[in-house]
Image: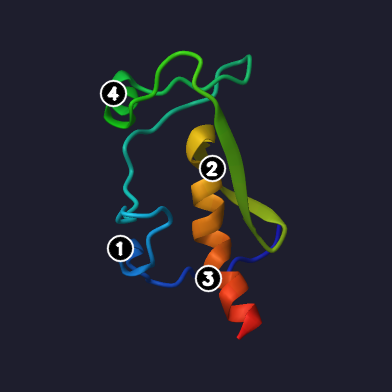
Amino acid sequence: MTERSEPKNVECCETEPVMKSTRCCCQVDALVSIDGRGQIVLPKEVREKVGVKAGDKFVVISSSSDDDVCCLFLVKADDFGETVKGLLGPMVKEILE
């Protein structure tokens, strides 16, 4: 196992919004587990809060540090295009400057 560096103390609300006209701020909404079939159940309160219904599709994004996956993110497939623009736009702008 590789040793991880301490995460930076950055308030997520200090970052630029990922999607237009939204303010990005992270919070823990629930603790879930994976069953024997590899399925995750999102609690009803979380589904209602974010408007998830049966049949909705999500993109699963992983984040890693030193080759260890540390985080998984779920992004509604319908919102993924805007999310990618929001994430890649600043990086592309910085590269081109």
Is residue 67 among the parts visible in the rendering?
Answer: yes
Q: Is residue 59 above or below residue 7?
A: above
Of label 4 and label 2, which has the lower sequence position? 4
Q: What residue is shown at x 40% (from left), y 17% (from top)?
A: 53
Near mark 4 (Cα within 10 A), the count class, few <14, some 14-19 or many ≥20, is few
Identify the residue under disc 4: 48
Q: Which of the two marks, 2 or 1, is nearer to us in this view?
A: 2
Between residue 46 and residue 53, name the one nearer to us: 53
CA–CA distance in space, label 3 to label 1: 16 Å
Q: What residue is shown at x 31% (from left), y 53% (from top)?
A: 22
Color theme of the render? rainbow
- Where's residue 33, x and y in %? 48, 26
Q: Secondary structure at mark 4?
A: helix
Of label 2 and label 1, which has the lower sequence position? 1
Disc 1 marks a residue whose amino acid type is Cys
- Where's residue 66, x and y in %? 69, 63
Q: Which mark is residue 80?
A: 2
Q: Which mark is residue 90?
A: 3
Q: What residue is shown at x 57% (from left), y 19% (from top)?
A: 39
Disc 3 marks a residue whose amino acid type is Pro
The part of the image, by quadrant, that contains residue 96 is bottom right
Disc 4 marks a residue whose amino acid type is Glu
Near mark 1 (Cα within 10 A), the count class, few <14, some 14-19 or many ≥20, is few
